[in-house]
Amino acid sequence: MILILLAPKMILNTNILLKMNFNFAYKLVIILNKFLPTQSIPVLMYHSVSKTPSKLSVSPENFDIQLKILAKSGYQSLSLAQFEAYYNQRKIPPKSVLITFDDGLEDNYTLAAPLLRKYNFIATFFINGKYIGSQASHLFVAEDRYKKIMSPEQLKKLSTQNFDIANHFYSHQPLISLSPAQIKSEYEQNAKFLKQSISPKTKTDFVAYPKNKTNPDVTGHLRFLGVKFGFSGHNIPAKLTNHRLNIPRIAIFNADNKLKFQAKLSPYYHMFKYLRQ
């Protein structure tokens, strides 16, 4: 009976201790990153900037806060050309960040892009051509399937504002389930579509894997097709030792508070496995 009465208080205390433990770890990795910087680039992965209650959405308010943190911390956002140059030179300027968006949802144009411009940041939008100008019926989160994908005109405008448009394959199918011929078709069909419909300058030889799924067979096929860089998941900053066709990205969520967001920028974040569960 006593245990039953004390249970709510015990749970509350456990939650407080757990939160303190997380915050301590966040602060530690932030400090380590400040005093022991490494040659790495946090590649941030977003999907939607909206108030939709979806795992893939970050609210405009929180996105603004995150960009403000990057700006105040002295980060400079990179274009894909800069990312490639630094990778080839084997030297990464400190406080570099690559900001990426998958799927091309219309809120990227109406909400994300103006906030990026507010802080003088650029970003890369990975686009799958099949759904341009239509509904995002292919996304796995139900709340997102009713959202619109950017139109060709909106993508063209972004491409004239120093934003990069890159390749997310044509129909957003996980490449690990496709044959070599299908992978070739998905890649080349999307590349042709983007160059003809958006801009000849579209970075079609930079790809993001649908659902972040890849394997050595997939990367082997893409290397043969001339793909320069492939971006996946893994939730750690990119390093010069990463395979060019398996560059890790850090998923950013609406639930990430200021400390957690700053901690995710640090290569030391992976030291605490419980933070990533």
Image (tube, rainbow, N blue to C red):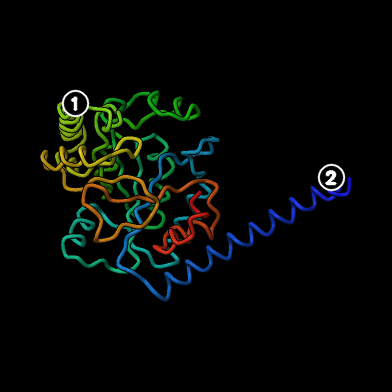
Tell me if label 1 and label 2 are in contact, CB under 8 Å.
Answer: no
Residue 179: horizontal and vertical position, in percent?
A: 19, 27
Q: Secondary structure at mark 1?
A: helix
Furthest-right residue in view? 1
Residue beneath the point at 45% across and 60% down = 269
* Occupied quadrant, residue 185: top left
In the picture, measured across the screen, residue 124 lies left or right of residue 26, that is: left
Residue 260: horizontal and vertical position, in percent?
A: 52, 57
- Toward the viewer: 70 or 36? 36
Residue beneath the point at 55% across and 35% down = 53
Tell me the amino acid under the disc marked 1.
Gln
Q: Earlier in the sequence, mark 1 or mark 2?
A: 2
* Occupied quadrant, residue 71: bottom left
Res. 4 mark: 2
The label nearer to you, 1 versus 2, is: 2
The quarter of the rendered structure image containing the N terminus is top right
Q: Secondary structure at mark 2?
A: helix
78 versus 147 height, above or below: below
Residue 86: horizontal and vertical position, in percent?
A: 21, 62
Residue beneath the point at 35% across and 43% down = 101
Res. 182 mark: 1
